[in-house]
Image (cartoon, rainbow, N blue to C red):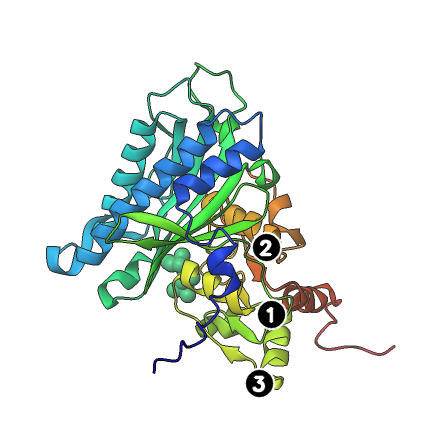
Amino acid sequence: MHTPSTPTPLPEHTIASPVGTTLERYIMQKQIEFPYATGELSQLLRDIALAGKIINREVNRAGLAGITGAYGQQNVQGEDQQQLDVVANIRFIRALRNGGQACAVLSEEEDDIIHTGNDHGKYVVAIDPLDGSSNINVNVSIGTIFSIYRRVTTVGSKATREDFLQGGRQQVAAGYILYGSSTMLVYTTGHGVAGFTYEPSLGEFFLSHPDITIPQDGSTFSCNEGYWFEYPECVRTYLMDCKRQRFAGRYVGSLVADYHRNLFTGGIYLYPPTGKNPEGKLRLLYECYPLAFLIEQAGGKALADGGPVLDVVPTDFHQRAPIFIGSPAMVTAYQACADEPVLPTTATTA
Ligand code: P6P
């Protein structure tokens, strides 16, 4: 006789939580929660997600399509562009131009502002279309980083520098797309952090992490120790302390991948000043600011030299900043090292 087995109870989240909601439904639901939302920011987020889907396809087929190599010219940073850098840049600018909500784009791959022609768009977007692209050839995760501001210039006019140099705390949304073992979109509009996982067979991002918060502490540090002898003394002091505690060194060489791992498991990513990059390597407007906004929304901390990344004053589109970002306890421990007075190496006694 068949004895009915007791069904395994489904995990609570399968029934109750919105996990599994599409990005589209999630954006609409969040828009309802903000009665004054006019839907333009929602549309802008959709446009970025669409470009992310297209780039995901390009990244996944790059090896077969023979577009993993160098493009043969340098960007404004003086860095050799990879073919996929150029493809991603074109795709994001096209998606934002066609979407109509962004009046201008500042891209790592472009010297100056790109006007989309949507002069009535209320937003501007700063973007690193494909960060870590040198890792494409070796099949390591790479990512897109974006930062969104409401324009401060008159709607209907051309965007200006002023729209992009508002400062990190004026961002209205920020996030990244990680093209990894799965492709994820993680973003904030200032009300917490949500993560969406892409299902390529359906062409949809599904809510997989409704409320991401970073562990308060961690035991992973991410930096390029090849620069050890160029690092400021306080950075070496901090890293030595990490090693004494047998913390793990994890450095992919792809900012979004290292950042994402530390966001989920706890950790700190450091890109201090070096001889080659005395201001740090990472760019303030489309790498440091958006990731700092997001990490603060996830309960983390982001420092530049002498204070929060979000308080660094922007003066140039492509300016760089040092960054120490991740679990608050780890960033605070680094800050304690940085605040230590630098004693003269050869103390003299009277
Ligand atoms: P380094 C990639 O070029 C990048 O901007 C980040 O993605 C990455 O974390 C860092 O630079 C790697 O720089 O100097 O360690 O090779």
Residue highlighted by disc 1 = 235
Q: Nearer the viewer, residue 298 or 23?
A: 23
Q: Residue furthest right?
A: 350
Q: Residues within 10 Å of mark 2 (few under 14, many from 20)?
A: many
Tell me if 204 is positioned left or right of 256 in this view. left
Residue occupying image coordinates x 50% and y 60%: 13
Disc 1 to disc 2, how far (Cα)?
24 Å
N-terminal-most mark, 3 or 1:
1
Q: Is residue 199 above or below residue 156?
A: below
Q: Position of residue 144 (x, y in %)?
A: 37, 50
Residue highlighted by disc 2 = 298
Label 2, secondary structure: give it. loop
Disc 2 to disc 3, how far (Cα)?
26 Å
Residue highlighted by disc 3 = 246
Q: Nearer the viewer, residue 30 or 14?
A: 14
Q: Position of residue 55 (x, y in %)?
A: 26, 48
* Residue 316 in view: no
* Residue 245 in view: yes
N-terminal-most mark, 2 or 3:
3
Q: What kind of residue is marked 3?
A: Arg
Q: Whereabouts is ligand 1, in terms of quadrant?
A: bottom left
